[in-house]
Image (cartoon, rainbow, N blue to C red):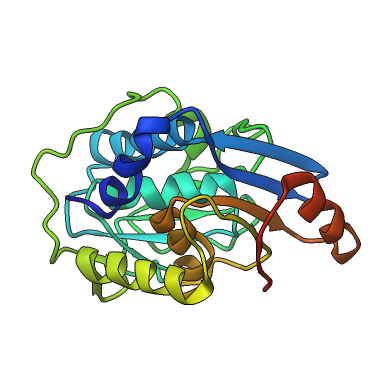
Amino acid sequence: MSLTEHLLRPLMSASARPLITHYDDAAGSRIELSVATLANWAAKTANWLVDELDVEQGETVAVRLPAHWQTAGVLLGAWWCGARVTAEDADAAVAFVGPAAAPSAARETAVVALDPLGRGLAGPPTEGTHDYLNEARLTGDEFSPILPVAGDTPALLDSTVDEVLAEARSRAGKLGIDDGARVLSTMDWELPGGVLDGLLAPLAAGAHLVQVTGADPAKLADRRSTERTTIDLLG
């Protein structure tokens, strides 16, 4: 079973509950994703990678994106179809990059608009690239791998599905994150430590993640009060 299925399946019995709340202080935005909405974006991403970009299990997907609700959908979609996630795009089947990123050396380049409301690029993508949000939203809302993703499949750098899941659970315990916790995080999602602590540990514990990108320190106290958070992960 894929890392994404391990993380999301236990949460689907309460699929309408909020799972990730994302603040972008630079944009002045707040977006809340339920379990079902995050699973939907992950499924669309996985379908798009497999059906449109011909990504196969075991291939590498590079993710060069900030901590963002769209990045969560990208990561979970890549893992759902059995891809190995890295930050290096030289040998990658696909590289996910932001709108102002340097050119990619990957086979395919997916530009993620990082628009607070989920809109795609304002204009056509540059030649040889894809507008991830506008293209992926047209794919199916459910995903089923052609073949089951084995636990020894590489998932994050050189760590396998089973190893990443075990490490995420271990880190959740060390950080005091449990089911029902409300985690305020300003961490970057660099690979692998930032993603493990800032995204996978809260998901593995079934916690509600309140992710603040471009955090304004003067607003953190208000975020804690408004979101009733119980744990801080400050980057």
**Of residues 99 and 126, which is closer to you in this image?**
99
Q: Residue at x 77, y 40 (%)?
A: 29
Q: Residue 69: x, y in percent? A: 57, 46
Q: Is residue 169 left or right of residue 118?
A: left
Up the image or down, 1 lies above or below 188; here it is above
Residue 64, horizontal then vertical, whole percent: 51, 62
- Which residue is located at x 54 percent, y 44 percent? 70
Q: Note whether residue 182 is visible.
A: yes
Residue at 27% across / 50% down in the picture? 6
Left or right relative to 72: residue 164: left
x%, y% of residue 180? 52, 50
- From this viewpoint, is residue 63 visible? no
Q: Where is the C terminus found, in terms of image quarters?
A: bottom right
Residue 143, by quadrant, is: top left
Q: Nearer the viewer, residue 68 or 12?
A: 12
Compared to residue 207, the image places residue 52 above or below, namely above
At a point 48% along the width and 58% down the height, the residue shown is 202
